[in-house]
C-alpha cells in the first residue's frame, strides 16, 4: 500500500513541477523584457551575497516590530528548512521507515526538525492572528488593499506544513518506536497514534499535496506577490542599488536624456513588482496615505505589477504606455519623496526611483503635469529660483549683515585666499523671511567662531532639486551643470572643497547627485558644522536656567534624516543650549514628512488633510512650547500648521531653526554676540603649488585649468592662487606668472627660477644659505648683483622681510613677468658676459624690468640680473612696472598678457625643469642654493635691495624675489624686498662680476649664452624710484 502512495505522489508531482518550471521561466522572461538600469546592479557580488544572508536571516528590517519579527523569522526559516523535510516525504511514501541518508539517524537533524516544526506552527498562528486583528477593510489597516485570499492561503499552507512535519515524525515513532532525546514533542504525540506504516505514508502524501497546492498556485498567478516574494525577494535584495545594504535614498539615478522617453521600464522595476509582499509597512508610514490621499506605495507597486503582467507580450515585452497610464495622476503627484516607503520595505523595493521614472515620462514624453509646475519650471529656468525673484535680491541679507558689522566675504569680490568653507545659502535662505533668519544666524555663528568662509551671493542659482523631483530632468541637468561649473571656479586654487548649507534639499543634491556631473565636494549640513564648533569650544552656548527650560521638540527633515541619516547633530546642539527635548511619537527614521518634498512645496494640496497640519498636530501633542527643525521648507510648512491649528489659542509654539536657537544661546541678554575669534582653519588645510603643466596657461587659459583643477580637488596653494582666481585679471596673471617662471627657465636664470618655484618649500633652506650670500653682498655691494643669484635666498633674509608687504601683490605679478623672461633668454648670454658675470647678472637684474617693463625685462624673474635691464626700461617701463608690482597694476600689465604669449616659451618650462636641474647644479657650486640660485637671481636683487640706492630696481627686485616666491608660498615674505629694489642699482655694481658668487650666475650664462645688454645694466643704478 505504501508503494501506491509513492507512485501517486509522483504522478501528481510531475505535471505540477513541469507547470511551475515553465511559469518560472516565463517570469524570468517578463523581468528580462525590461530596459536597462542606470545604476550597476552586479558590482561587488561578494558584498551583495553577504547582504542577502544578513537581511534574510537577520531580518534587519523588522527590528521595530519584535514580535512580528520573531514570528516571521520562524515561518521563513521553517519554510526554507521545511523544504528539505518536504522533499523527504517522497521517500516516506515509498519507505515509511526510511529518510535522508546520513541525516535520518542523526539526532541533531531530528532536533532541528522538531524545533522548527513547532516554531513554524506558532509563527503561522501568530501571523494569522495579526491579520485577523488588523483586518483589511479599514483604511487605517496596513492590510487595506492587500489581497486577502492568497495571504490566508499561504499562511494556512505553512501552518499545515509545520503540522505535517510533526505528524510524520510522530507516526514513525509510533510505528517503529525509534524515539530519541531529540524528539521531545513528537514522541508524546506518538502515544496517541496507532502503529501503521500506511499511516506514515499517508501523512507524507498529504504533506506533499499541500506543498504542491502552493507550487501550483504561484505558478498560476504571477500577481500573488505574497507567495512569489518567497522566491524573488532573494534576487531583489541581491540586485539592490547599494551593495552595502544602504537604502535607495539620497540620490536619484541620472538617466541619459537622449534615451527614448517611451523606452521600456527597467527590469528592476518589473522585479520590484514581483517582490512586493503586500505587507503594508510602506503604507503604514506614508504621509500621503495617512492624510487621505489616494497614494499608497503598496498599491502603487501592485498596480504596476498588474498592468505589467496584463500588458506583457512575450515577443514585444511590456507596453510601457499602458503601464504608465495605470497610475492615476492624483496618485502619482501626491508623493512627497519622503522615503518612508523605501526605508520600511523588507524586500528593498525602490519606490522613489519608480515614481521619478513615471513623473519624468509624464513631463518629458507627454507634457502632462500639474499646472502649478509650469510656473516653477519657468522661474527656475529664467530666474534661477522657484519664486521668480530677482537675482540681485540674493545679496540683500549680506548688505544687512555687513551693516551690523558681520564680515560676509563674497567669492569673486573679496580676497578669499584662505577660505575653508563655501556657504551655499540656497534659494529659500536668500528669499524667504523665515529662512533668512536662519541664514543670518549661521553667518553670525561662523563669524563668532572665526571660521573662514565665503558666499557666492548673486553667483548662486537653484540646485534644480524641485525640477528633478517634479520630473523635469532636462531642467535639472542644465542647472546642475551650471552650478558645478560655478563651484569648480569658486574652488579653483583651493585643495579642500567644503560646502555648508542650511537646506537639506540642497545638501542632498550637492552631496549625492552632483558627483554624476563631476561635482565632487565635501558637503555638510549647518547643524553638523555648528555641532563641531560647540564640541571644540569655539562656540559656548549658555544653558538656560532650570526655570527657563521650556520643553522643545525637534522635527526630522526627510532629506536630512532618512535620506542622509543625520539624526544626532541637531539634537546634540539643542541639548547644548540646555533645553528639555521631548520627542514626537514618530521621530528619526519613522518621522512623518512635513509635506514639502517632491516639489509638493510648490503645488496646492486639495485632497484630504494637509500633511503639514497632520505633522504639526503630532508636535503639538508633545506639549512643547517650541518646535525646532533644520530645514527652511519644514520651517515654512510647520509654521503654517501652527498658525492654522492654534489660531484660537492665546499662546502658540514658536517654530525656529536649530541655528537660531544656538545663536540666541551664545548672545547676551541684549542679543549681542561675543567678541569674534581670530579667523583660523578648523583643520590644517592642504596646500599645493600649481604644477608647471597647469601653470603654463596665460591669462586666457588660466581660467580653463581652474575648473579642471577644481574638479580634481588638486588646485594650487590656496594662499597664493585662490585670490588670483578671484580677480579675473590677476588670476590669469598669476597662472601666467607661474608659467612664466617655467619659461624663465629657458633663460638661463629664469630656468632656475622655475625650479625654485617647484621647490617652494626648499627656498627657506636655501634662504638660510642665502644669509651667507647676504654678507657676500656687502663684500661687493654692487657686485652682489652677481651674487644676487645666490642672494635670491638672501631675499628671504631679513632684508626681504620688509618687502613682505608688497610680496603678496607682486608675488603674483612677478610671475607674469616670468613669462617675459622667456625673451630674457638672450640675456643669459649676457650672463657669459657675466664672466663679467656680475654685470651679466646685472642685466638679468631686468627684474626691475619685470617689475616694470616685465616684457622687456624678460629676466624679470632674476631680479638681480634684470637690474641693468631695469635701467634700460626703467625710464618709461619702470613706471609701468611699478604698477605691475602691485597686483592692481597688473591691469597695466594687460599689455604683459602679451608677454604671456612668451609663456608659450613655456614649452621651455619643460626645459625649465631641465634647466632648473642644470642651473641648480651650477648653483650648487656657487652655493648650496644652486636650485634657488636661478630664482635667487631675482632674489639677489633683494640683497642688493640693501643697497637700496637704486629704487627703480626696487620694484623689480621684489618681484624678482616674488617670482620665486609665488611658487614658494614662503617667498611672499621676500616680497618685502621691494624696498630692496634699490638693490637694483647695485646691479651697476654688477660689474663686480669678480665676485666669486657670480660663478653660479656663470651657469646662467651657459643657459642663455651671451647678453650684451649686461653692459647697459650699469646705467640702471642711476635710475631710482
Image (cartoon, helix red, strand yellow):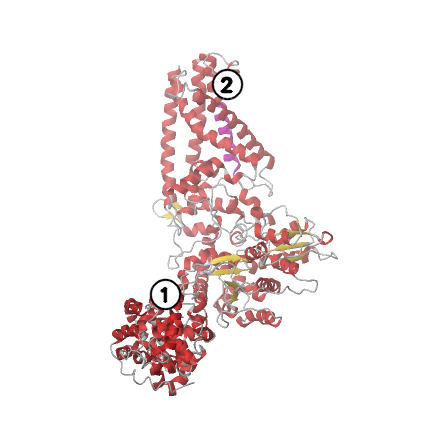
Which one is in front in this view, the residue at disc 1 or the one at disc 2? 1
Of pointers 1 and 2, the one earlier in the residue sequence: 2
The residue lying toward the viewer, choosing from 952 and 138, is 952
Residue at the right extreme, as displayed: 650
Using the rendered image of the protein, determine whether residue 278 is visible from the camera's viewpoint.
no
Mark 2 residue element: helix
Element carrying mark 1: loop
Check the image and report above or below for 750 versus 530. Answer: below
Q: Position of residue 67 (x, y in %)?
A: 57, 34
Q: Is residue 666 visible?
A: yes
The correct choice, above or below, for 328 with respect to 910 in the image is above
When asked about the image quadrant of residue 630, the answer is bottom right
Q: Quadrant of the N terminus?
A: top left
Mark 1 nearby-residue class (10 Å; few <14, some 14–19, many ≥20):
some
- The quarter of the picture where residue 402 lies is bottom right
The residue identified by callout 2 is 186
Magenta span contains residue 578: no
| For residue 784, above or below residue 67 | below
Separation of residues labelled 1 and 2 (CA atoms): 84 Å
x then y, percent, for residue 236 = 43, 42
Residue 31 image position (x, y, % from top left): 39, 44
Q: Main secondary structure of the magenta part?
A: helix
Q: Is residue 150 rendered magenta in the image?
A: yes
| Image coordinates for residue 419, horizontal then vertical, percent | 49, 65
| Residue sitting farthest toward the front | 779
Asked whether 289 or 575 is in front, the reply is 575
Question: Could you say which is closer to the camera, residue 836 or residue 238?
Answer: 836
Tag on residue 759?
1
Q: Which span is picked out in magenta?
A: 146-164
- Answer with left or right where residue 835 lies relative to residue 301: left
Amino acid at each position: 500500500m505504501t508503494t501506491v502512495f509513492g507512485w501517486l505522489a509522483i504522478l501528481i508531482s510531475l505535471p505540477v513541477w513541469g507547470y511551475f518550471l515553465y511559469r518560472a521561466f516565463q517570469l524570468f522572461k517578463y523581468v528580462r523584457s525590461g530596459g536597462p538600469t542606470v545604476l550597476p546592479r552586479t558590482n561587488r557580488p561578494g558584498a551583495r551575497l553577504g547582504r542577502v544572508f544578513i537581511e534574510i536571516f537577520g531580518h534587519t528590517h523588522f527590528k521595530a516590530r519584535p514580535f512580528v519579527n520573531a514570528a516571521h523569522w520562524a515561518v521563513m526559516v521553517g519554510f526554507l528548512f521545511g523544504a528539505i523535510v518536504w522533499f523527504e516525504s517522497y521517500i516516506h511514501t515509498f519507505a515509511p521507515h526510511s529518510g535522508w541518508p546520513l541525516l535520518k539517524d542523526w539526532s541533531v537533524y531530528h532536533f532541528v526538525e522538531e524545533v522548527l516544526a513547532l516554531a513554524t506552527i506558532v509563527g503561522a498562528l501568530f501571523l494569522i492572528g495579526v491579520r485577523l486583528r488588523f483586518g483589511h477593510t479599514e483604511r487605517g489597516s496596513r492590510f487595506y488593499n492587500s489581497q486577502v485570499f492568497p495571504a490566508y492561503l499561504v499562511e494556512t499552507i505553512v501552518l499545515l506544513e509545520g503540522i505535517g512535519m510533526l505528524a510524520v515524525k510522530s507516526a514513525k515513532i509510533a510505528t517503529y518506536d525509534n524515539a530519541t532525546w531529540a524528539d521531545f514533542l513528537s514522541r508524546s504525540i506518538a502515544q496517541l497514534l496507532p502503529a501503521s506504516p500506511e499511516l506514515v505514508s499517508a501523512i507524507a502524501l498529504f504533506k506533499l499535496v499541500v506543498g504542491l497546492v502552493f507550487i501550483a498556485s504561484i505558478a498560476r498567478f504571477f500577481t500573488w506577490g505574497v507567495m512569489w516574494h518567497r522566491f524573488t525577494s532573494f534576487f531583489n535584495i541581491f540586485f539592490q542599488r547599494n551593495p552595502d545594504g544602504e537604502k535607495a535614498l539620497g540620490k536619484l539615478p541620472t538617466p541619459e536624456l537622449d534615451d527614448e522617453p517611451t523606452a521600456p521600464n527597467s527590469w528592476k522595476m518589473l522585479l520590484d513588482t514581483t517582490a512586493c509582499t503586500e505587507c503594508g509597512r510602506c503604507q503604514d508610514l506614508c504621509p500621503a496615505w495617512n492624510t487621505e490621499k489616494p497614494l499608497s506605495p503598496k498599491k502603487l507597486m501592485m498596480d504596476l505589477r498588474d498592468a505589467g503582467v496584463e500588458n506583457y507580450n512575450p515577443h514585444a515585452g511590456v507596453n510601457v504606455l499602458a503601464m504608465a497610464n495605470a497610475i492615476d495622476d492624483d496618485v502619482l503627484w501626491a508623493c512627497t519623496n519622503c522615503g518612508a516607503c523605501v526605508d520600511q520595505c523588507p524586500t528593498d523595493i525602490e519606490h522613489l526611483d519608480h515614481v521619478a521614472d513615471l513623473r519624468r515620462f509624464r513631463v518629458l514624453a507627454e507634457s502632462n503635469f500639474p499646472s502649478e509646475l509650469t510656473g516653477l519650471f519657468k522661474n527656475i529656468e529664467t530666474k534661477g529660483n522657484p519664486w521668480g525673484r530677482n537675482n540681485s535680491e540674493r545679496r540683500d541679507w549680506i548688505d544687512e549683515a555687513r551693516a551690523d558689522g558681520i564680515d560676509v566675504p563674497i567669492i569673486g569680490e573679496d580676497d578669499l585666499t584662505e577660505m575653508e568653507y563655501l556657504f551655499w545659502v540656497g534659494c529659500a535662505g536668500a528669499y524667504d523671511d523665515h529662512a533668512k533668519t536662519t541664514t543670518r544666524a549661521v553667518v553670525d555663528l561662523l563669524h563668532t567662531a572665526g571660521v573662514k568662509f565665503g558666499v557666492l551671493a548673486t553667483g548662486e542659482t537653484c540646485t534644480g532639486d524641485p525640477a528633478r523631483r517634479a520630473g523635469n530632468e532636462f531642467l535639472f541637468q542644465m542647472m546642475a551643470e551650471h552650478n558645478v561649473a560655478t563651484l569648480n571656479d569658486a574652488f579653483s586654487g583651493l585643495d579642500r572643497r567644503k560646502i555648508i548649507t542650511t537646506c537639506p534639499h540642497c545638501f542632498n543634491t550637492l552631496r549625492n547627485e552632483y558627483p554624476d556631473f563631476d561635482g565632487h565636494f565635501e558637503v555638510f549640513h549647518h547643524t553638523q558644522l555648528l555641532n563641531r564648533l560647540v564640541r571644540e569650544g569655539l562656540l559656548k552656548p549658555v544653558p538656560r536656567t532650570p526655570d527657563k527650560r521650556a520643553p522643545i521638540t525637534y522635527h526630522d527633515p526627510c532629506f536630512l534624516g532618512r535620506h542622509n541619516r543625520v539624526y544626532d547633530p541637531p539634537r546634540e546642539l539643542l541639548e547644548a543650549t540646555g533645553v528639555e527635548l521631548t520627542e514626537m511619537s514618530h521621530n528619526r527614521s519613522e518621522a512623518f514628512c512635513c509635506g514639502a518634498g517632491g516639489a509638493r512645496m510648490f503645488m496646492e494640496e486639495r485632497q484630504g488633510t494637509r500633511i503639514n497640519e497632520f505633522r504639526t498636530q503630532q508636535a503639538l501633542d508633545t506639549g512643547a512650547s517650541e518646535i525646532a527643525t533644520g530645514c527652511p521648507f519644514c520651517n515654512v510648512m510647520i509654521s503654517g500648521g501652527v498658525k492654522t491649528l492654534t489660531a484660537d489659542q492665546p499662546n502658540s509654539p514658536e517654530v525656529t531653526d536649530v541655528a537660531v536657537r544656538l545663536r540666541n544661546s551664545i548672545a547676551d541678554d541684549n542679543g549681542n554676540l561675543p567678541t569674534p575669534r581670530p579667523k583660523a582653519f578648523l583643520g590644517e588645510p592642504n596646500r599645493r603649488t600649481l604644477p608647471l603643466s597647469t601653470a603654463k596657461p596665460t591669462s586666457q587659459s588660466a581660467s580653463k585649468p581652474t575648473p579642471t583643477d577644481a574638479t580634481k580637488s588638486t588646485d594650487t596653494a590656496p594662499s597664493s592662487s585662490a585670490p588670483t582666481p578671484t580677480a579675473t585679471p590677476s588670476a590669469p596673471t598669476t597662472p601666467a606668472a607661474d608659467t612664466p617662471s617655467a619659461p624663465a627657465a629657458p633663460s638661463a636664470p629664469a630656468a632656475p627660477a622655475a625650479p625654485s618655484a617647484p621647490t617652494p618649500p626648499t627656498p627657506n633652506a636655501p634662504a638660510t644659505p642665502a644669509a651667507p650670500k647676504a654678507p657676500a653682498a656687502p663684500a661687493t655691494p654692487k657686485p652682489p648683483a652677481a651674487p644676487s643669484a645666490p642672494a635670491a635666498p638672501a631675499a628671504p633674509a631679513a632684508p626681504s622681510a620688509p618687502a613682505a608687504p608688497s610680496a603678496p601683490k607682486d608675488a603674483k605679478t612677478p610671475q607674469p613677468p616670468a613669462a617675459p623672461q622667456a625673451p630674457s633668454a638672450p640675456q643669459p648670454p649676457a650672463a657669459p658676459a657675466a664672466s663679467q658675470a656680475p654685470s651679466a647678472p646685472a642685466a638679468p637684474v631686468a627684474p626691475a624690468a619685470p617689475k616694470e617693463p616685465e616684457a622687456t625685462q624678460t629676466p624679470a624673474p632674476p631680479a638681480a640680473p634684470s637690474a641693468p635691464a631695469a635701467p634700460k626700461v626703467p625710464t618709461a617701463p619702470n613706471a609701468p612696472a611699478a604698477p605691475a608690482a602691485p597686483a592692481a597694476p597688473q591691469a597695466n600689465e594687460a599689455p604683459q598678457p602679451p608677454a604671456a604669449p612668451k609663456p608659450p616659451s613655456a614649452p621651455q618650462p619643460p626645459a625649465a625643469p631641465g634647466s632648473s636641474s642644470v642651473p641648480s647644479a651650477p648653483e650648487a657650486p656657487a652655493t648650496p642654493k644652486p636650485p634657488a640660485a636661478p630664482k635667487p637671481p631675482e632674489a639677489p636683487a633683494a640683497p642688493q635691495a640693501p643697497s637700496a640706492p637704486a629704487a627703480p630696481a626696487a620694484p623689480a627686485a621684489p618681484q624678482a624675489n616674488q617670482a620665486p616666491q609665488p611658487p614658494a608660498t614662503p617667498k611672499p615674505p621676500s616680497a618685502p624686498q621691494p624696498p630692496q629694489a634699490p638693490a637694483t642699482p647695485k646691479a651697476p655694481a654688477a660689474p663686480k662680476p669678480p665676485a666669486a658668487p657670480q660663478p653660479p650666475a656663470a651657469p646662467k650664462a651657459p643657459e642663455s649664452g651671451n647678453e650684451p645688454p649686461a653692459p647697459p645694466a650699469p646705467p640702471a643704478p642711476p635710475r631710482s624710484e
